[in-house]
Amino acid sequence: MDTSQDKYLGIRTEGTLEILQKSAHYNRYEATPYAVLDEWFAAEPLRPGDHLVDFGCGKGRVPIYSAYRFGVTATGIDLNGRLLQEAYENLESFRTAHRKSGGQIIFEQTEAEMYAVQPEQNVFYFFNPFSLEIFQSVIFQMLDSLARSPRQADLILYYPTTAYVFFLEEQTPFSRIREIPIPFLSEDNEDERILIYRVG
């Protein structure tokens, strides 16, 4: 499935990759399966005008597929220059294969905790890209942006850690609005799920 979808989009994003990061707080690269993205989008489709941010975007699968499927603007954030170079190559290849498709796609190399959340950004995706400490910093940056530019915002967590969930539910104004099991993966692993939180 992933190979054929990558081929259709004209990109290469499969597999996992252990790359020495500048910080031990950042985890390895692993692309979100397309089937998981499809479960998310079936339950909570992106809307016209949404601006998705993928923290730990790696080779760019989530921003490219989201922009292709919904025509939204999608921003991918990653610290690793090697992965982002592949994301840019994937974007160029995608644009060649689908010249008239997809919304705006942006990639930015930066530490997640240093990224300034923009007023138009309202959907934030995480597939365990970094430690709880970094996650907390990102959420506080996000809440500051929401205080300055009030709007509804959604957090999408795939394969969420207990620490992420506890922090969100006990120490932030985000409320869980939906849990999406991944039927073909979750039989033996209860962490195989998507949690969606909302504020505003």
Image: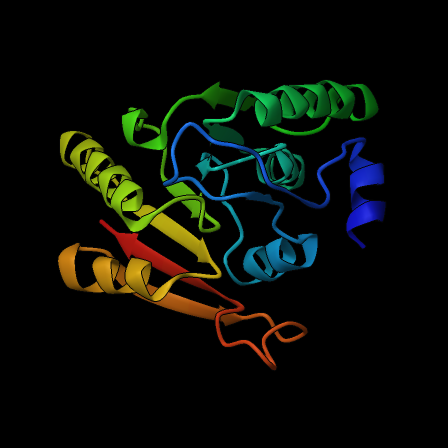
Above or below, 25 against 132 in this view is above
Q: Is residue 99 visible?
A: no
User: Which residue does the image show at 48% across and 61% down from the upper left?
Assistant: 159
Judging from the image, the colouring scheme is: rainbow
In the displayed structure, 197 sits above or below 60; it is: below
34 sits to left or right of 147: right
| On screen, residue 73 above or below 169 | above
Q: Position of residue 39 (x, y in %)?
A: 60, 62
Q: Position of residue 21 (x, y in %)?
A: 47, 31
Seen in the picture, residue 35 relative to 116 is either above or below; the reply is below
84 vs 174, nearest the viewer: 84
Left or right: residue 15 versus residue 157 is: right
Residue at the spot x=25%, y=40% of the render? 151
Residue 38, quarter of the rendered image = bottom right
Q: Residue at x 82, y 25 (%)?
A: 97
Residue 86 visible in the picture:
yes
Q: Quadrant of residue 161?
A: bottom left
Is 89 positioned to the left or the right of 110 in the image? Answer: right
Looking at the rendering, which quadrant does residue 177 occupy? bottom left
Viewer-proximal residue, 46 or 184?
Answer: 184
How many badges with numbers are in the image? 0
| x and y, in percent, of residue 86 in the image | 67, 24
